[in-house]
Image (spheres, rainbow, N blue to C red):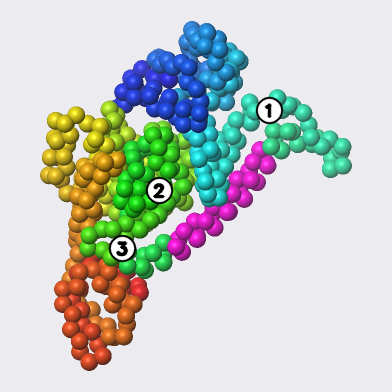
Amino acid sequence: MPERVGEGGLRSLDARIAEAVGLAQAIGIDVIGKKPFRLRQLRPASLFGKGQVEEIAALAEQHEATLLVVDAALSPVQQKTLEDETKCKVIDRTGLILEIFGERAATAEGRLQVELAHLDYQAGRLVRSWTHLERQRGGFGFLGGPGETQIEADRRQIRDRMARIRRELGQVSRTRGLHRGRRQRAPWPVIALVGYTNAGKSTLFNRMTQASVMAEDLLFATLDPTMRNVKIPGFDRAILSDTVGFVSNLPTELVAAFRATLEEVAASDLILHVRDIAHPDSDAQAADVEAVLSSLGLAEEDSPPRIEVWNKLDLLPPAERQELIGEAERRSDVAAVSALTGEGVDGLRETISHLLHSGSQTHQVRLNAGDGERIAWLHARGEILEQRHDGDQLQLSVKLSPENWARFEQL
């Protein structure tokens, strides 16, 4: 765990080490030792100072380690130097997260997104991935001049594969767009769960929908987005969407690769930001989530309304728990819950209902009495204040949110 002097922000060193260990354990790595290092300057050749590299090598030999995980981004040169000095395979934070995603992706789309991110990462590491860089391929002289080098051929193959994956993901994105268009014409709001990995999103999802999505005490237990019906007061039906968890220093390759999936968040009616309020770095984790959302064009002022869900109340001491519940009750954009025990979940449903109805305006609508589909749409999505017949016409006074009024006008 390297930390540069003067860095660290809101995150405590112990919590950062615990997270790094959790990432390693998420793919079954047996962690036999861990140690933080403070860096006065970043060494281009090895990241660490010479004495620190020697200490790491000694620790690896002492523990008979075969894998060294560095909780930072390593350049190809730094990775190669550390492998030579420690006689261990070396993997950095980006590579570790990619390994987790590669193991967990369950759908064809998820696997494509992970492969794209991995190829993007690997393309810059061919300099150390091949020991035969100077070997020429071709060379029979049929086309004249020397053949292309092995590394050029491999880079070309990677670029071609990435282009094919991007085309396939583009089709996925277009299909998602069509599905979103149909949902937006349907009378049901879409609520997206976001949050730091292991904040309890899937447990809350299961609690609210009676589903059985994988929910374990593991980082990145959920990768592929899942949607289920959920009951919200005042709505005939709503859709809850569980999404991939975020993490600090999320590799840029993964942010780009999962953009199509996270478009679901941008298209939702409401965002639930689930926080592990019992975690010592809860504030830092929340800041990381907001940073990723902003990088996706979802800064708070430009995105759907959101509610902070302060989860894992059951892990707090009684006095702190009551204090947080009181603070949440004084705010309209916060709900305090325990997804594990169900405490506060009914209150969360009420908060969601209130926010989805906020900003509603009353509209006068005149429809043919036989237009059952649009009449049912208004009953399901709005609050009917008055309804009267005028021959074969139906006059409705209905209260709708601005988003639902815009949707109704498109029906």
Q: Quadrant of residue 316?
A: top left
Tell me residue 57's x, y (percent). Answer: 53, 11
Q: Nearer the viewer, residue 187 or 166?
A: 187
Answer few, some or many: residues within 10 Å of disc 1's Cα (few below 14, many 20 plus, some between 14 and 19): few
Name the residue tied to disc 3. 237
Tell me residue 191's x, y (percent). Answer: 32, 54
Q: Quadrant of residue 194?
A: top left
First reached walking from the N terminus: tag 3 or tag 1: 1
Q: Tell me the element at label 2.
A: loop
Q: Residue at x 46, y 35 (%)?
A: 251
Placement of the N terminus among the 4 image quadrants: top left
Name the residue tied to disc 1. 130
- Nearer the viewer's eye, disc 1 or disc 2? 2
Q: Nearer the viewer, residue 132 or 269?
A: 269
Tell me residue 333's x, y (percent). Answer: 20, 48
301 left or right, relative to 181:
left
Magenta region, residue range: 155-179
The numbered mark at residue 212 is 2
